Image (cartoon, rainbow, N blue to C red):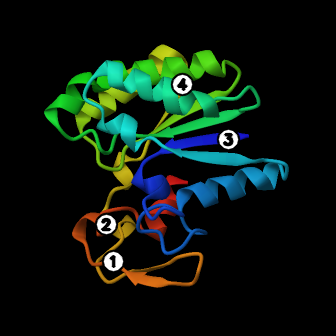
Amino acid sequence: KTLFIGNSLLQGFTEFGMAASDSEHDYYYLVNNAIAEQNPEHTSLKVSGTQWEGKTTIADQNAWMQNTLAQYLTDDLDLVIVQLGDNVNTDAKKAIFAEGCQNLLRFIRNAVPNARVVWVGAWYQTEDKQRQMIASCNNTGSLFVNIWDLNVSANRSAIGNTYTMADGTVNTITDSGVASHPGDNGMKAIA
């Protein structure tokens, strides 16, 4: 059983990762498929961690972990994939990021000590954030997966690309912020 904790790359279009062409082309779907090929009984959940990214105090981050995340950290988890850090983009958020990363990983590790924990970071990266994520992973026995180098034009979506919702509605990407997210090539590379 896998728990994914992420941001817009995980569920920015509510049903799937922002800028993927549909729900079968985001990294969540692709990772789940790869695991299911090895173990057809695999199940997974996804939780938005954008609120954690948006906090500007350790107390508020800790409250989110206790009040929101804790309920998903069940004994039957084998893998926890944390894909956060992209929205840590203000001085106040950056000031607590190093401590917050360690706290989040320790919280997960304490709740599910037998699960493998992986931090995937980050599409929108800085060297400081990368160092802090790596140090937090090293200090908590977690694995860091660097995706920063995947954020190149061939892996980004583009204005004019379309995406299809589960009900068949087709939408066109018109916003440059949305278009900067990974498209299908980027999602595949992340997976």
- Report how far apart the C-alphas of labels 1 and 2 lie in the structure: 7 Å
The residue that label 2 is drawn on is 178
> In the rendering, which numbered label is found on residue 2?
3
Q: Residue at x 62, y 60 (%)?
A: 29
- Left or right of 35 on screen, residue 41: right
Q: Residues within 10 Å of mark 3 (few under 14, many from 20)?
A: many
Give the mark nearer the N terminus: 1 vs 2: 1
CB under 8 Å between discs 1 and 2: yes
- Left or right of 130 on screen, residue 67: right
Report the number of discs: 4
The residue that label 4 is drawn on is 142
Q: Amino acid at mark 4?
A: Ser
- Left or right of 102 on screen, residue 46: right
Give the mark nearer the N terminus: 4 vs 3: 3
Q: Residue at x 30, y 69 (%)?
A: 179
- Report how far apart the C-alphas of labels 4 and 3 lie in the structure: 15 Å
Residue 87 image point, x, y percent: 29, 44
Residue 4 image point, x, y percent: 57, 43
Is residue 63 visible in the rendered image? The answer is yes
Q: Amino acid at mark 2?
A: Val
From the viewer's side, name the closer residue of 191 and 86. 86
| Disc 1 element | loop
